[in-house]
Structures are given as C-alpha cells and as structure tokens.
Amino acid sequence: MANVKHHQVEVNVSIDRMWGAFQDMPHLLSKIVPEGIKSVDKKDGTVTIHFAPAIAEKYGDYVKEKVEVDHKTKTLVTEMLEGAGLGKKYTSKKLVTCLKPGKSASSTLVSWDVHCDPVGEDAAEEAESLSTLKKVEEHLVANPSLYA
C-alpha cells in the first residue's frame, strides 16, 4: 500500500499566475534551474524531462510522467511512468497538487500529496520540493508579467 505524505505552503503569488506556472512547470523549471534540466518533451498527456549531469547523478538521466490537469479544481496529477528512481527508489509514485486561494488576493495555498511506495527512505524529498516551490515563487515575484 502506498505511503501518502501531505504538504502545504502559502506563496505570495496570485492563484491564476501560480496555476499558469504549474501547467508550464517543466519548461519553467528549465529556465529557473537551467543547470538541472537539459530538455523537456510534452506528448500525448506525458512529459519527459531530461536531466543535466548534476541532477542525473542523483535521479538518472530522465523522468517520464503522465500528467492530468483539472482546470475547474486547479488540480494537477503527475504519475511517474519511467526513470528518476522508479524501481530503485520507488515502486510507484504519484503527486497530486491542488491550488486554493490564499489569505489575500495575491497569495495561493499550494497543497500536494505524494503517494509513493518507497524502496527506501528519502528524507530530503520534502526539503527539495519546498526549495523548488520557493524558487518558482521568487521567479514569479521577480517577473510580475509572467503568467499574468
């Protein structure tokens, strides 16, 4: 049975801009962390991210994920299909991310559930997720017209 870890954080970006960023996340991350991502391919409801050597050393050369988007509930579901430790770190992994309005019109409550069957423990995963989310927030705050 899969382990489920729930995470939640409020960011200082409006929900519409954050939703735009989440839908474009692989491409956005290639701009924010160019040393980590070599290329991104979207095709038929899947996304394949090819990692640069610094990331590939830890996660492998790539990850292929099935992506489902629900615009009405602002929910994004990504399920790992291949790569990035599947079979070594996890037997399965799915991320369910949901955006809700924050305390102000210019903030968003981001919650995500990680459903996974780990082969071992990865305590650094939560810290990495928060770090990535903060980089996205900083990039959007610094670029106010992006996804506006």
Image (tube, grey):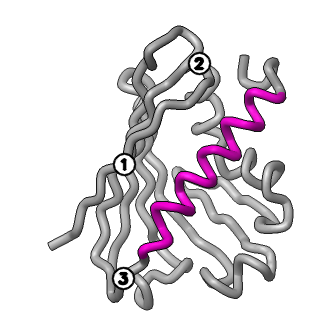
Q: Quadrant for residue 92, please give it.
A: bottom left
* Among the two numbered marks 1 and 3 on one chain, the one whose residue lies closer to the N terminus: 1
Q: Quadrant for residue 138, please give it.
A: top right
Residue at (28%, 76%) from the top-left corner?
117
* Among the two numbered marks 3 and 2 on one chain, the one whose residue lies closer to the N terminus: 2
Mark 1 highlights which residue? 7
Residue 147 is situated, as x and y percent measured from the top left of the image, at 72, 24
Disc 1 residue type?
Answer: His
**Residue 129 is covered by the magenta coloring:** yes
Q: Residues within 10 Å of mark 3 (few under 14, many from 20)?
A: few
User: Main SS of the magenta segment?
Assistant: helix
* Among the two numbered marks 1 and 2 on one chain, the one whose residue lies closer to the N terminus: 1
Tell me the number on the disc at residue 14: 2
Spatial CA distance of label 1 from label 2 is: 19 Å
Tell me the number on the disc at residue 29: none
Residue 17 is situated, as x and y percent measured from the top left of the image, at 64, 23
Q: Secondary structure at mark 1?
A: strand
Residue at (44%, 41%) from the top-left corner?
76
Disc 3 residue type?
Answer: Glu
Left or right of residue 19, residue 5 in this image: left
Disc 2 residue type?
Answer: Ser
Which residue appears farthest toward the top when viewing the image?
105
* Magenta segment boundaries in residue numbering: 123-142
**Residue 137 is covered by the magenta coloring:** yes
Q: Quadrant for residue 68, please give it.
A: top left
Mark 3 highlights which residue? 121
Residue at (47%, 58%) from the top-left corner?
66
